[in-house]
Image (spheres, grey):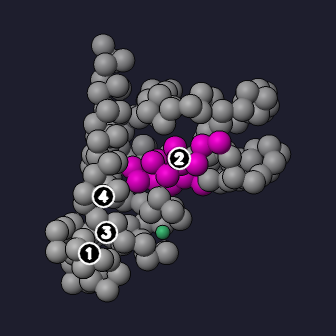
Amino acid sequence: MSEKEEDDIKFLADAMLGSVARKLRIFGFDTLYVPDTSDNEILRLAAEQGRVILTADKELFKRMMKQGAPGVLVDGTSDLDDMAHIFEKLGISANLFSRIGSRCTSCNGALVQKRPEEVGALVPATVLARHDGFWQCTDCQKVYWDGGHLGRIRAFARNLEDRLSASKG
Ligand SMILES: [Zn+2]
């Protein structure tokens, strides 16, 4: 799959997969998270918006298969296992590190890089003093910085890439 095709993949994550949904967003994947939604509504939304359904619900997955709706059944116990499984199933292989910091984990909005002086009023002074890589959500205005949350995501990405390259043999 080309990088362009990978960019076009959109996900819909069901109630059990909130943490996976947030990680997919930080890797830049357009991900709708629907915690309080019926199976019927999930199927309808996914079809309408062209999204790949991610679920840990075997009954829902059976219905998806019957209807030919694209989706991946995951275990729902480990984000690392689940995401390795999703990326393998869909053939997603692009460098995950280049994707970090492109979408807001809270609201799925696009992130843009900011200079420290542009976000100075929105982050604690100690953070401002210690970091210089900042991103801000264009929708909810949440600010991200290197270290902190993005540092943990980088560590997660490293583990995930190791896992994916190991399973390729
Ligand atoms: Zn946001």
Residue 44 spot, x, y in % from top left: 77, 49
Q: What stretch is highlighted in magenta?
A: 16-32
The reply to whether residue 69 is in sight is yes
Upstream in the sequence, badge 3 or badge 4? 3
Upstream in the sequence, badge 3 or badge 1? 1
User: Whole-Å distance between the Cαs marked 3 and 4?
Assistant: 12 Å
How many numbered circles are shown?
4
Left or right, 71 with respect to 36, comes to: left
Of badges 3 and 4, nearer the viewer stands 4
- Assign a secondary structure to mark 2: helix
Left or right, 68 with respect to 19, comes to: right
Upstream in the sequence, badge 2 or badge 4? 2
Residue for badge 2? 19
Residue for badge 4? 148
Left or right, 66 with respect to 16, comes to: right
Upstream in the sequence, badge 4 or badge 1? 1
Q: Which amino acid does label 2 sit on?
A: Ser
User: Whole-Å distance between the Cαs marked 4 and 1?
Assistant: 16 Å
Seen from the viewer's position, the closer of residues 61 and 149 is 149
**Circles 3 and 1 in contact, beta carbons < 8 Å:** yes
**Circles 2 and 3 in contact, beta carbons < 8 Å:** no
Seen from the viewer's position, the closer of residues 168 and 19 is 19
Could you tell me which quadrant the N terminus lies in? top left
Asked if 82 appears above or below 19 in the picture, the reply is: above
Q: What residue type is labelled 4?
A: Gly
Residue for badge 1? 114
Q: Is residue 90 magenta?
A: no
Residue 16 spot, x, y in % from top left: 65, 42
Which residue is at 17% across, 74% downward? 129
Residue for badge 3? 135
Q: Local crowd at mark 1 within 10 Å, few (<14), some, or many (≥20)?
A: some
- Assign a secondary structure to mark 1: strand
